[in-house]
Amino acid sequence: MQNHQRKTYVTQLHKFYNILSQALVQYQNDKNALNLKEAGLTSLDALDEFFQNYFKIVSSCNSNVTPCFASEYKNMLGKTYKVGLEHHITLADGTSVAYSCHGGDNIVFTVYVDINGPKGPNIAGRDTFAIYIYNNGVIDDYFTGMAPMTNEERETAFNNKCADPKMENWYGCFGKILNDNWEMNY
């Protein structure tokens, strides 16, 4: 993959990250809450309301994957995956977002983001990423503890998930980009 294309993908991912981060802060402030669960972000209905109120949605596919997302995705080594979260939307800038409540103590919800919508390459770690939103408002990769993750934890997730040819999950790639200061060095 050309360096220019990698930079374009990372720039689009960073843009989504910033918009999501600002929306989470605004949501928490609007609810006068100390954390996201206290603010009420605890159900699929609350997530629907959050995205409807804080994002410019042009298409809502609800539980249907297509046409908001492509019908299948691959990891960087070519293994095929399907998007499997509860609701799928397309934003005004063409970004596809799938989201689902997580239900754990620390992670509030999961987001799969395809920064260029259903257009290719549809590869986890290239144009598609798994992002986790924690109760304290931190946006990070998957972790069982309280975010933020350490650099070492992100590197381990990258090596064991994103870069592993047997990868069964979408996570690990986003944390590597965070570690590498918004560069796609893999």
Image (cartoon, grey):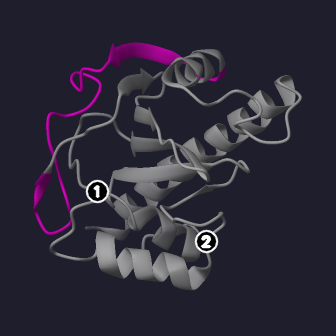
**Which quarter of the rendering shows the N terminus?**
bottom left
Kindly identify the amino acid type of the residue bearing the numbered disc 2. Answer: Met
Residue pointed to by mark 2: 149
**Local secondary structure at mark 1:** loop
Please determine whether, in this image, residue 125 is positioned above or below residue 128: below
Spot occupied by residue 19 in the image (x, y as percentages of width and height): 64, 38
Q: Which segment did they paint magenta?
A: 54-80
**Which quarter of the rendering shows the C terminus?**
bottom left
**Which residue is outermost to the bottom?**
152
Q: Residue at x 50, y 61 (%)?
A: 141
Q: Residue at x 34, y 17 (%)?
A: 62
Spot occupied by residue 21 in the image (x, y as percentages of width and height): 68, 43
Magenta: predominant secondary structure element? loop
Horizontal side of 73 relative to 37 (left or right) equals: left
Residue pointed to by mark 1: 124
**Local secondary structure at mark 2:** loop
Quadrant of res 65: top left
Q: Is residue 67 magenta?
A: yes
Horizontal side of 63 relative to 145 (left or right) equals: left
**Which residue is outermost to the right?**
32
Please determine whether, in this image, residue 159 is positioned above or below residue 134: below
Spot occupied by residue 46 in the image (x, y as percentages of width and height): 59, 21
Q: Residue at x 73, y 51 (%)?
A: 136
In this view, the mark in front (2 or 1):
2
Q: Residue at x 37, y 69 (%)?
A: 3
Q: Is residue 183 visible?
A: no
Spot occupied by residue 143 in the image (x, y as percentages of width and height): 51, 65
Q: Is residue 172 visible?
A: yes
**Which residue is outermost to the left?**
79
Callout 2 environment at 10 Å: few (<14), some (14 to 19), or many (20+)?
some
Horizontal side of 68 relative to 9 (left or right) equals: left
Q: Earlier in the sequence, mark 2 or mark 1?
A: 1
